Each structure stands twice: as C-alpha cells, then as structure tokens.
Image: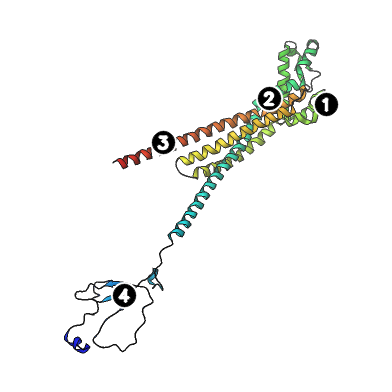
Amino acid sequence: MSPDERGAGESSPWEPPDRRGEPPGEYAGEQTVEATGQPSTAPLSPAPTTPVRRVQNRAPGAAREILRPVRGPGGRVRSGPRRAPATWAARSSFRVADEDARLHRQMSRWMGVGGLALVTGLLIVAWSAVQLTGRSHATQVLEQTLAPLSDVDRLLERDYATLQTQAQAADDTSVIVQSYPLGIAIPAAELSQMSRDEIRARVLSVSAERIYESGVGTFTREDAGQGSFFSPSGVFELTAGQLTARNHTIAIIIAVLLALFFVPMLVRALSEGSGAERARNMGAGLALGGLGLAIALLIARGLLRGVLSSDDAFSDALLDVGLNAAGLPLRNGLIFGALGGVVLAASLAFEALLWRWAGRRAWAEDAG
C-alpha cells in the first residue's frame, strides 16, 4: 500500500498530544518524532545534542513518543547529560566547615574562661591589698612587725625603771620613751601606773598609727632617736611601709577598675554555650583564677623562704613581714578557687544527670 493510500484510508496515529489541563510551558522546547503520509522534504536533522527524557503520551489512542529536554536550575536547558552530585566532596567540605565552626566556638569559650581567670586573679590581689591596707588590719600588722624590728622588749627591760623614775619626777608633764626610734610621749601620771606590758602596747600602738598615717618617713624626724633599726636597704619601706592610708585609697581605686573589667568577662563566659555549660564556664574561670594565684603564692613563699633565710634576726623579721602579708591573698585565692570548684562540680553533675535522663527516655521510647 502506498503512503498516500494509507494516509487517505486511515487516520494517522501520530496526532499532537492533548495539552489541555497541563501546566503552561510543560512542553516548551519539546521535540516530536512523527510519521506522516507525505514524504518529508526537509533534510534529516541530526540527533538532538540536548539531553532528553522519554515521556509516553497518555492521550487516548496516541502512540507518539515525546522527547523532552532535561532542564537545569532556573529553567535553563542543560548542555550535556546530568551529572551525579559530588556527594563525597560536598560532605567533606561540610565536615570541614563544621569542624572549623566547632574549633572556633571552643577557642572563643576557652579565651573567655582564660580572661575571666586572669581578671579574677588580679581582682583577688587588689581586694587583698584593700584588706591589708585597711586601718584595723594594717595597724595590727604594723604592731606585730615593729615589735621585733625595734627591739622594744629589750629597751623596756633595760629602761623601765628609768621611765618610772622620770614619771614620778615629771608630775603633770609627758615623758618620752628614750632609745626608741619614734619619740613616743606618754603622760607622766599614766606612765607611773603602767606595767611593762602596758607601756609596750602603748608604744607599738602609737607607732603603728603614725606609720599608717604618714608612712615610714616618720622615722626621719629629728626627735626620732636612733633609727638604725629601720635603715638597711629600705626593706622595711617596701614591706610594712606600704601599709598606709594613701595606699589604701589607691588599692580601692584599682579594685573598682578591675571589678568593672570582671563583670563583662563574667558575662562573656556565661554567654558561651547554653544551660549547664554557662555555669561550667563560670566555675572554671573562678577556679583557675583563685587556685592559680594560690599555687603561685605558695611556690613564691617556699622559694623566698629557702633562698632568703639567714641567721640574721633582723633580716628574718623583714622576711616574715612579706610572707605574712602574702597569707591574705593566699587565703582569698583558696576561697575563690573553692567557690569556682563547687560551681564547676555542680554543673558537671547536672550535665551527667541530664545525659542519664536522656538515655533512660530514649530507652523507654525504644522499648515502647
């Protein structure tokens, strides 16, 4: 049968598909292969280079096969076959990005904890200086220091009888304690009724008050008597001489400034992480700052005691002044360290309870 007779006697099975009800643009750019009753005069077109997918037309009685181009993102026709995604490379890049982000968070967290520990240690030192230079504590330390340095016990043992004789002869005037580096005057009426220990307490108390108010420059007065006890290398000025009212004011100012730095460092440590991690950061910072300072002071005291100890009673007395002064920041460091340790232990225990509760809940869900 000729092509013309076949075309005239029966309908062509290659009818255009019914596109009604389909979204617009669905068949845009499609290429069809159809057979007609007339020989095509157009040159044979080469096979399409655009990747296509075969779709079977669902129109009734139709047997045409439609070749649709594979479209990429944005509706653009891909110029080649679709490639499988590089899953290994993508996952590797994502893994590296996650590790970098995790490392950055860890570094930021430990920097916050380290900054909190540093400021905590400095704040402990400043607060200890405020306590050391307070009037009540400073005068007490000065009295304890002046007793061995001035050799007041030996002086009173030698001159006590002379002082009593001068007090009985002076009537209403005051008597100056001789052979003492400071010119301490005591009313004769009181001096005549005072025992040796009472005179000692009065001399040391007045001397401590003078040093606290005026500093060690008090010993340069013309009526100070023999001041050789306080002259070697200015050691006394660098130790007990710092316990003055002026230094107390300076210590308060420094402590307030450090407290202003302490607050943002504490806020930063609490902002890293969530839940129990914040308490863990705060506890770690306080514990590192307090215990680190305490350990450093213990090592320093041991080294100074081993290196500077000698048979000279005067030098040992000066050394005891400095070592006793370091006892207060040591105690405060231990207090802060213990407080931070308690917070750290509580946060770790809370995290352990959360993990245990989550594990039991997951087990119950799996069992149910």
- Residue under numbered circle 4: 67
Choose between 225 and 339: the one closer to the eye.
339
Asked if 72 appears above or below 94 in the picture, the reply is: below
Horizontal relation, residue 156 to residue 107: left or right: right
Q: Is residue 81 visible?
A: yes
Check disc 2 and give the amino acid type.
Val
Judged by depth in the image, the label closer to the viewer, 1 or 3, is 3
Judged by depth in the image, the label closer to the viewer, 1 or 2, is 2
Residue 127: quadrant of the picture: top right
Horizontal relation, residue 227 to residue 81: left or right: right
Check disc 3 and give the amino acid type.
Leu
Q: Residue at 50% across / 35% down in the picture?
A: 344
- Residue under numbered circle 2: 141
Disc 1 to disc 4, how far (Cα)? 117 Å
Q: Residue at 68% across / 24% down in the picture?
A: 141
Q: Picture coordinates of residue 67 (x, y %)?
A: 31, 75
Few, some or many residues within 10 Å of mark 4 (<14, 14–19, 20+): some
Residue 82: quadrant of the picture: bottom left
Horizontal relation, residue 90 to residue 61: left or right: right
Horizontal relation, residue 9 to residue 92: left or right: left
Task: Name the element at disc 3.
Answer: helix
- Residue under numbered circle 1: 222
Mark 4 vs mark 2: which is more N-terminal?
Answer: 4
Circles 3, 4 touching at the beta carbon (< 8 Å): no
Disc 1 to disc 2, how far (Cα)? 26 Å
Check disc 1 and give the amino acid type.
Glu
- Name the image quarter holding the N terminus: bottom left
Circles 3, 2 touching at the beta carbon (< 8 Å): no
- Residue under numbered circle 3: 353
